[in-house]
Amino acid sequence: MKTLAVVNHKGGVGKTTLTVVLLHLLAERGLKVLAVDLDPQANLTLCLTQNISEDIPQSYHLLIKGSS
C-alpha cells in the first residue's frame, strides 16, 4: 500500500482538482483508492459525492453541448 498526500497551506492552488484527477486515473488503472478529505471546506468530499445526472442540466451541457 502506498500513501500519497496532496497538501499546501495556500488555498486556490488546485489541490482538489489534482486529487480528483489522480483518484480517477488510478482507479481507471484498476487500483483501489481512498480519499480522506481533511479540509474544513470539504470541497473534495462535495466533488466526489455530487450527484451528476444527465437529466439535470449542468455547466458541462452548456460548455460541451452548447445547451443548458
Image: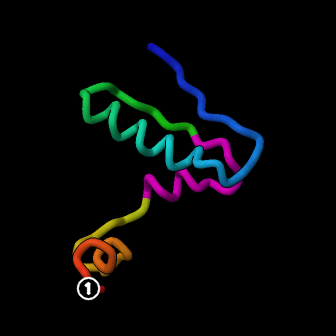
| Residue sitting nearer the eye, 56 or 66 | 66
Residue 49 pos. (x, y %): 43, 56
| Residue sitting nearer the eye, 42 or 18 | 18
Secondary structure of the residue carrying tag 1 is loop
| Residue sitting nearer the eye, 65 or 55 | 65
Q: Which residues are magenta?
A: 37-49
Horizontally, residue 37 falls left or right of residue 60, namely right
Horizontally, residue 12 falls left or right of residue 3, namely right
Check residue 53 for magenta coloring: no
Horizontally, residue 66 falls left or right of residue 10, namely left
Residue 31 drawn above or below residue 52? above
Residue 34 drawn above or below residue 2? below
Residue 59 pos. (x, y %): 38, 76
Q: Which quadrant is home to the N terminus?
A: top left
The residue shown at (26%, 35%) is 28
Q: Which quadrant is home to the C terminus?
A: bottom left
| Residue sitting nearer the eye, 49 or 66 | 66
Residue 5 drawn above or below residue 49? above
Snapshot colouring: rainbow
The residue shown at (54%, 50%) is 44
Neighbor class of circle 1 (other Cα within 10 Å; few <14, some 14-19, many 20+) is few
Residue 23 pos. (x, y %): 40, 37
Horizontally, residue 37 falls left or right of residue 17, namely right
Residue farthest right in this picture? 9
The residue shown at (44%, 52%) is 48
Check residue 43 for magenta coloring: yes
Residue farthest bottom in this picture? 68
**Residue hosting label 1:** 67
